[in-house]
Image: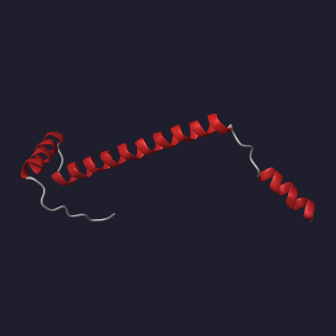
Amino acid sequence: MTEVRIRNVDDWVVELHRHQAKLDGRSLESELRQVLTDAAAAKKRAIADEMRGQLSELREKYGTLSDSAALIREDRDSRG
């Protein structure tokens, strides 16, 4: 894992997370780790959703392409 240091964070931001950490029974570090993980996971899901939408649009426009592996194998076999 990577170690990260964040400087110049407003006091109210730190206090808000410190308070939430106390309510959740964990350390400030653990709370901030969870906040960052949740934000990254949400971003990752949004990107995946967008990509699925684009793939769906391509399938609607061009249809589904066949798997060319069998054709390539047949061509190679014909050459000996």
Q: What is the residue that sits farthest to the front in this orientation?
A: 61
Query: In the displayed structure, does residue 55 sit left or right of residue 48?
Result: right
Is the image coloured rainbow, by chain, by secondary structure, or in one colour? secondary structure
Query: In the displayed structure, does residue 79 sit left or right of residue 72?
Result: right
The image shows a total of numbered marks equal to 0
x then y, percent, for residue 65? 71, 43
Query: In the displayed structure, does residue 20 sit left or right of residue 38?
Result: left
At 19% from the left and 54% from the top, the residue drawn is 29
At 17% from the left and 51% from the top, the residue drawn is 27
Q: In this rendering, is residue 72 above or below 17?
A: below
At 12% from the left and 48% from the top, the residue drawn is 13
Which is nearer the eye, 60 or 10?
60
The quadrant the N terminus occupies is bottom left
Residue 80 appears in which quarter of the rendering? bottom right
Q: In this rendering, is residue 25 above or below 69?
A: above
At 20% from the left and 64% from the top, the residue drawn is 5
Residue 73 appears in which quarter of the rendering? bottom right
x then y, percent, for residue 68? 76, 50
x then y, percent, for residue 37? 31, 49
Q: In this rendering, is residue 14 above or below 49?
A: below
Which is nearer the eye, 52 or 27?
52
Q: What is the residue that sits farthest to the top in this orientation?
A: 60
x then y, percent, for residue 44? 41, 47
